[in-house]
Amino acid sequence: MYIPMKILFVCTGNICRSPTAHGVLRDLALKQGVNLEVDSAGLLDYHEGDNADPRTIAAAAQRGYDLTDIISRPVERDDFYKFDYIFAMDTGHLKALRELCPPSLIEHKKIQLFMDYSQSYKSQSVPDPYYGRGDGFELVLDMIEEASLNFLKALRSD
């Protein structure tokens, strides 16, 4: 029985950046025939049970991504065992995830900055569009689409 690789995206509240990455990678993997299980979570639980921000959903829909089924949840201790990759959306999330990670798993390279898969935005944080202008959601999509395509390419070359 084939078990799909499991990917988790993490941002602050799980309503903008991580659900965008969740939906984009899920869709691109499906279109390319790559079997992945994709999820997203937030470091904080104050949006637990909420859908993604309506602006996030609208921006993604304009590019053909459906995020309406993604529900915010907080990161859980079991996530560090369950997922093959845990992708931080910014450097602060990366630091927090490494601090939360059980010591026995920290040397594994499962916790990474997602933009390290981007050529245009390598080592950069995905900016939080929540408090900015509407075009911030477009930039987030640009960054995530590029990193997602490169991640899928890297998976196929392994």
Image: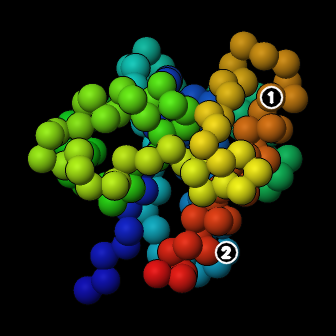
Foreground of the two, 12 or 106: 106
- The x and y percentages for residue 73 are 40, 32
In the image, what residue type sits under mark 2?
A: Lys
- The x and y percentages for residue 148 are 63, 59
Relative placement, left or right, of 102 versus 7 is left
Seen at 65% across and 48% down, the residue is 122
As drawn, the label of residue 97 is none
Tag 2 or tag 1, which sits nearer the N-term? 2
In the image, what residue type sits under mark 1?
A: Gly
* Residue 40 position (above or below residue 96): below
Relative placement, left or right, of 150 versus 96 is right
Q: Is residue 12 visible?
A: yes
In this view, which residue lies farthest toward the left?
104
Query: Marks 1 and 2, how far apart in space?
Result: 26 Å
- The mark lying in front, picked from 1 and 2, is 1
Seen at 37% across and 47% down, the residue is 111
* Residue 158 position (above or below residue 98): below
State the SS at label 2.
helix
**Mark 2 neighbour density, 10 Å: few (under 14) some (14–19) many (20 or more):** few
* Residue 115 position (above or below residue 130): below
Relative placement, left or right, of 158 versus 139 is left
Relative placement, left or right, of 7 versus 19 is left
Q: Is residue 71 visible?
A: no
Residue at label 2?
31
